[in-house]
Image (cartoon, rainbow, N blue to C red):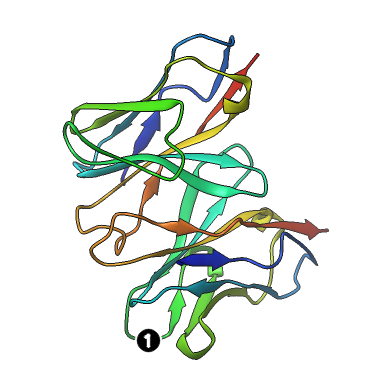
Amino acid sequence: DVKVTQSSRYLVKRTGEKVFLECVQDMDHENMFWYRQDPGLGLRLIYFSYDVKMKEKGDIPEGYSVSREKKERFSLILESASTNQTSMYLCASSFPEGSNTEAFFGQGTRLTVV
Amino acid sequence: AQSVTQPDIHITVSEGASLELRCNYSYGATPYLFWYVQSPGQGLQLLLKYFSGDTLVQGIKGFEAEFKRSQSSFNLRKPSVHWSDAAEYFCAVGSSGTYKYIFGTGTRLKVLA
């Protein structure tokens, strides 16, 4: 089975802190994604990566950056956390063919910024 | 613009009753269609997918969905709902040659005992 693992289920951080959310997949997928999920808004794409060191902005990249130094690992970075970044963050991965194949999701990280 | 609409934010059904969750999409190219389920506090799990061929697709947990090109719909159905089906359901569309999935805003299902 494909496994996408996010390093934390719950995080509480203070405003202004630098926050790292880590995601690891074990299926040798080329594509990896970070989504943000908020009630009534569904899933919104923050960033995705189609190869090591390659990244592209999604729909809501402001306030976030990403890092992909190894194929299996994709990190989301909040440079200076703010309360409006309190949300559920979901990591996903997929095969290289693109969005004509399914994405596999991690269990999510619920981040609270106080 | 590409979009996915799930018109029902909340649906409540009694255990044992049938279920239909609606999904409409707007997409110029041939769509690849997915239904995911999310239990509380969890990530998304794929229920089923449609790429081509038979327009009625079977998924896990007794779910099925029918692709209707003329109506731009991909509705999810289950003949008899179980209490464990209470969750949030997301419809999504993808396309060959792009990396982007477009998700609907979700339908939250409540099951009455």
Q: Is residue B41 above or below residue B13?
A: above
Q: Quadrant of residue B32?
A: bottom left
The furthest residue to the bottom? B70
- Whether residue A40 appears in this view of the structure is yes
Total labels: the figure holds: 1
Pinpoint residue A92: horizontal percent, then vertical percent: 37, 42
Pinpoint residue A104: horizontal percent, then vertical percent: 37, 48
Q: Is residue B97 above or below residue A107?
A: below
Q: Amino acid at mark 1?
A: Asp
Q: Is residue A25 above or below residue B97?
A: above
Relative to the observer, which residue lies in front, A56 or B14? A56
Mark 1, secondary structure of its residue: loop
Pinpoint residue B71: horizontal percent, then vertical percent: 54, 86
Q: Quadrant of residue B57?
A: bottom left
Query: In the rendered view, does A13 fall on the left or right side of A63?
Result: right
Q: Residue at x 30, y 64 (%)?
A: A100
> Can you identify the residue that label 1 sits on?
B54
Q: Chain of mark 1?
A: B
